[in-house]
Image (tube, rainbow, N blue to C red):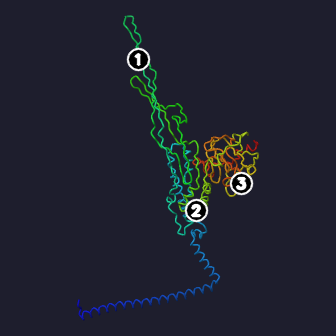
Amino acid sequence: MNISAHELGQQAAGQAGEFSKKAGGKLARKAAGKAAKFIKKLVVNLIKKFVVAVVKAVIVTVGIEVIAAFIALLIFSAILMSVPFSDWTLKGGQRTAAEEAGDRQYEQGFRNLADQSVVPIDDEEADQLWKETLKNLVKPNWAIPASLVRYKLMHTDAKVVLPDAKEVFENLAPTFSYITIDNDLKYSKTIMACHHEESSGGSSDEFGNSESSSTTVYDPPVETIVTSKMPPRKIMSRVDTRYGGTDIPSVKKYFPGGTLEPNGQWEYIGSYSSGDCDYTTYIQWEKTMIDDRGVPEILYDANSFKNYLISRGVIERNLDEYYEYVKATDPYFPLELYNGTYVQGGGSDVYSNADYSFAGKSVDGWVWPIAIDYRGINSGFGPRWGVFHYGVDLGGRGWPNAPILAAKDGLVIWAQAMGTYGNLVILAHTDGLQTRYAHMSSITVKAGDQVKAGQQIGRQGETGDVTGPHLHFEVSIPNKKNPLGRMAEAEKAFDPMIFLGPIKSNGE
């Protein structure tokens, strides 16, 4: 393509003009930048001179020592503010009323979730007190999620924000297993009683007319029994938690009457007549139900609990720290879950054979609960070491493995370890009282056993939270909603010497 000299000159002039414009803009911007830097430097110098003048004036006024202390305080505050919960520390560990109200509301969320998780137990057909006992036994302890939150907050440098309670509680709800019952039978009995008229021999009156009479004859009643299957139904057979589980035994009962053996009783249904016959119907039936005669026992599995905590973010080397949070939140949380061992009811330290036969006398149905000659009290009922001691301590090192005896006729409702109690037996008595026998080295009964006053239930030991071997003995009217709960929640806690005092005085 050919371009004339004139056109080429015009293009060159245009490009030069554009370059000049760009160069001019660049020079202008450069000049403006230098002016801004000069102004900034001038302002900074003015501020420095002002600060120096102020500092000199302050030093002259208050002295260099005060300035140094102030600077040190600022540095300390900066360091402290970088630590989690520093706002709480700077306030002297005090929380506002609004913060405390929020804490209680947050805690209540865990309690509500725990209550909801055991609602399926309410649907089972069993004694109400037994169901409440089972619910409290398997209900997730709110100290578990609360301590997970505390652990998380203590191991984060971020702003303290309480996580969603439902997320923390996730996977803590117990799981329920069921079995299908399809072999229960129903028996329907019908008794048919019929009658008919029979004519008697004829006779004649004085005029020779013949007469006849009839008699109602009742036939022997006829009894018919028809057997049929009851509709299939499901009942709870096991409950599993994150730290153990318990089988729910079942038993076949016979109705009416609800006895464990067939009783021959029938329930009247109704009567009707048809023609010359009267019919009366009855039924009896079998029903396999939860066996609510004894309290279920949980076999604690500390390793499963440890693995659960690790899955929720607790570093294995920090498990002891987490456990400390749990114990601080709920001192009655099972100690068995802290030591990483599997505690089973059939172990060497529980359910061993009794080796003591009681030959003493009772006073008003009570006996001294430890088989030793000494009737002294090591520690009485009432305030002790800043807390309340709800029982009396008997025995001691002088009587190693002394037999522990049922103080009164009763039903064993607990016979295994429980938190600070160590190996514990709880007896329920027909008069509404409950007795507890703690810290035993071994247990010689199991839940559901009926025991007599003076019968051996275990041996003296030092399991649980103790300073030496002894028997810790309690008497109470338990909390009806939670008969296995802590003594502080009991309806009434008694000084055991109200009942043991007459025995001690008589020396029996």
Q: Single out the mark in the foreground, 2 or 3.
A: 2
Find residue 468 and name its label. Answer: 3
For the point 51% across and 34% down, which residue is it? Answer: 256
Horizontal arrangement in the rendering, residue 359 relative to residue 215 (left or right): right
Q: Are marks 2 and 1 in contact (CB under 8 Å)?
A: no
Q: Earlier in the sequence, mark 2 or mark 1?
A: 1
> Is residue 332 visible in this depiction of the protein?
no
The three-letter code of the residue at mark 1 reads Glu
Please determine whether, in this image, residue 321 is positioned above or below residue 296.
below
- Residue 353 is left or right of residue 254, and the answer is right
Residue 469: where, in percent of width, then height?
A: 71, 52
Residue 308 or residue 168, whichever sits in front: 308
Tell which tag, 2 or 1, sits nearer the viewer.
Answer: 2
How far apart are the alpha carbons under marks 2 and 1? 93 Å
The amino acid beneath tag 3 is Gly
Residue at 55% x, 42% y: name it. 291
Q: Is 506 situated left or right of 112 in this image?
A: right
Q: Which residue is mark 1?
A: 197
Crowdedness of circle 1 by 10 Å Cα count: few (<14), some, many (20+)?
few
Tag 2: amino acid: Glu
Residue bearing the label numbered 2: 316
Q: Residues within 10 Å of mark 2 (few under 14, many from 20)?
A: few
CB of mark 2 within 8 Å of CB of mark 3? no
Q: In the rendering, at what x and y percent does residue 496 appear?
A: 69, 47
Tell me the distance, in whole angstroms, between the alpha carbons under discs 2 and 3. Answer: 31 Å
Element type at mark 3:
loop
